Image (cartoon, grey):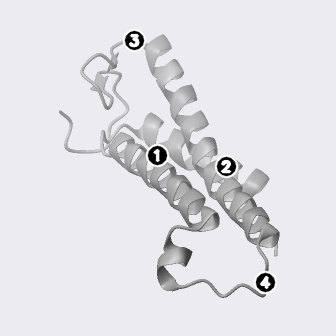
Amino acid sequence: MWQYFHTKVNDLVLFEGWKVEEPGVMALACALTFLLGVIFEFVKWAKKRVVASLKLRQNPSDSPTPIQALFAAPHLVGTAFFVLQLSIGYLLMLIVMTFSVWLGVSVVAGATLGFIVFGDRS
């Protein structure tokens, strides 16, 4: 395992079966990593939209107890999105920790494109 940033094509990415030993496999790994970065930003955007939509459907005059608020649909759906977002984020972090320059650039480029497309425009 590499302990420094490198451009060599000899990596193990996330799983034992995902070995990158050829340039074509590295290109595919970079494409998948790029896509995962875009999906990460999409999940953040979707969470905000879906939770806001669910909150609009609630009656504003209702004042739920803390337990009811904890198990309300917007909070549960937001929690599910958060779990997905956190999982993808940690996978991206682990990919960067392969110290492959190509995979690291793919993570940053994918998340950047995702932010351009789905980012907050307020």
In which image quadrant can residue 11 be found? top left
Q: Earlier in the sequence, mark 2 or mark 4?
A: 2
Which residue is disc 1 drawn over?
A: 88
Q: Quadrant of the C terminus?
A: bottom right
Residues 29 and 121: in front is 121
Q: Nearer the viewer, mark 2 or mark 4?
A: 4
Q: Nearer the viewer, mark 3 or mark 1?
A: 1
Which residue is disc 2 drawn over?
A: 42
Residue type at tag 1: Ile
Q: Nearer the viewer, mark 1 or mark 4?
A: 4
Which residue is disc 4 drawn over?
A: 60
Counting other residues with Cα less than 10 Å from the Cα at mark 4, is it few (<14), some (14-19), or many (20 or more)? few
- Give the answer, above or below, for where 104 lies relative to 20: below
Q: Quadrant of the N terminus?
A: top left
Whether residues under marks 1 and 2 lie with C-beta atoms below 8 angstroms apart, the answer is no
Tell me what residue is drawn at x 19 percent, y 43 percent.
3
Residue 30 is left or right of residue 46, and the answer is left
Secondary structure beneath disc 1? Answer: helix
- Give the answer, above or below, for where 10 lies relative to 104: above
Q: Earlier in the sequence, mark 3 or mark 1?
A: 3
Q: CA distance from mark 1 to mark 4?
A: 34 Å
Residue 98 is left or right of residue 73, and the answer is left
Q: Nearer the viewer, mark 3 or mark 2?
A: 2
Tell me what residue is drawn at x 33 percent, y 14 percent.
21
Residues 115 and 80: in front is 80
Counting other residues with Cα less than 10 Å from the Cα at mark 1, is it few (<14), some (14-19), or many (20 or more)? some
In the drawing, what numbered circle is on residue 15? none
Secondary structure beneath disc 3? Answer: loop
